[in-house]
Image (tube, rainbow, N blue to C red):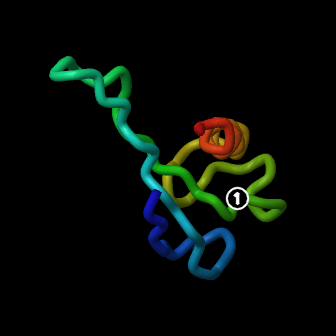
């Protein structure tokens, strides 16, 4: 995965973001669209909506956990 930097208004700094990878299945449609994941979500984001993705902190933490589980 290739990380990029994006400015976060809530944290007032640049944070690392990554697009989740699309599973490839031999010519068939992917199971899901790539999702933007903030790798630096933390206490400043708790109980709030992400200013980059417009998703809740809980959803972002779940995406980070899913990335960690991928081989």
For this view, does 32 lie left or right of residue 14?
A: left
Residue at x 79% of width, y 47% of height: 47
Question: Which x, y percent locates residue 50?
Answer: 60, 54
From this view, report whether residue 29 is shown above or below residue 12.
above
What residue sits right under mark 1 in the picture?
41
Count every numbered label the image shows and give the total: 1
Quadrant in the rendering for residue 31: top left
In the displayed orientation, state which residue is furthest to the right. 43
Badge 1: how crowded within 10 Å, few (<14), some, or many (20+)? many
For this view, does 18 lie left or right of residue 13?
A: left
On the rendered image, what quadrant is the C terminus found in? top right
For this view, does 13 lie left or right of residue 30?
A: right
**Which residue is more in the foreground, 19 or 46?**
19
From this view, report whether residue 2 is shown above or below residue 7.
above
For this view, does 1 lie left or right of residue 65?
A: left
From this view, report whether residue 12 is shown above or below residue 65.
below
Question: Which x, y percent locates residue 28?
Answer: 20, 18
**Which residue is more in the foreground, 10 or 71?**
71
Quadrant in the rendering for residue 14: bottom right
User: What is the secondary structure assignment of the residue under circle 1?
Assistant: loop
In the displayed orientation, state which residue is furthest to the left. 27
Question: Which x, y percent locates residue 37?
Answer: 54, 51
Residue at x 55% of width, y 59% of height: 51
**Which residue is more in the foreground, 30 or 33?**
30
Question: Which x, y percent locates residue 70?
Answer: 59, 37
């Amino acid at each position: 995965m290739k990380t990029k930097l994006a400015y976060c208004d809530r944290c007032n700094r640049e944070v690392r973001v990554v697009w989740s990878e699309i599973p490839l299945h031999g010519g068939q449609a992917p199971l899901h669209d790539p999702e933007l994941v903030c790798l630096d979500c933390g206490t400043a984001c708790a109980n709030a909506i992400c200013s980059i993705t417009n998703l809740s902190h809980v959803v972002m933490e779940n995406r980070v956990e899913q990335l960690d589980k991928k081989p």
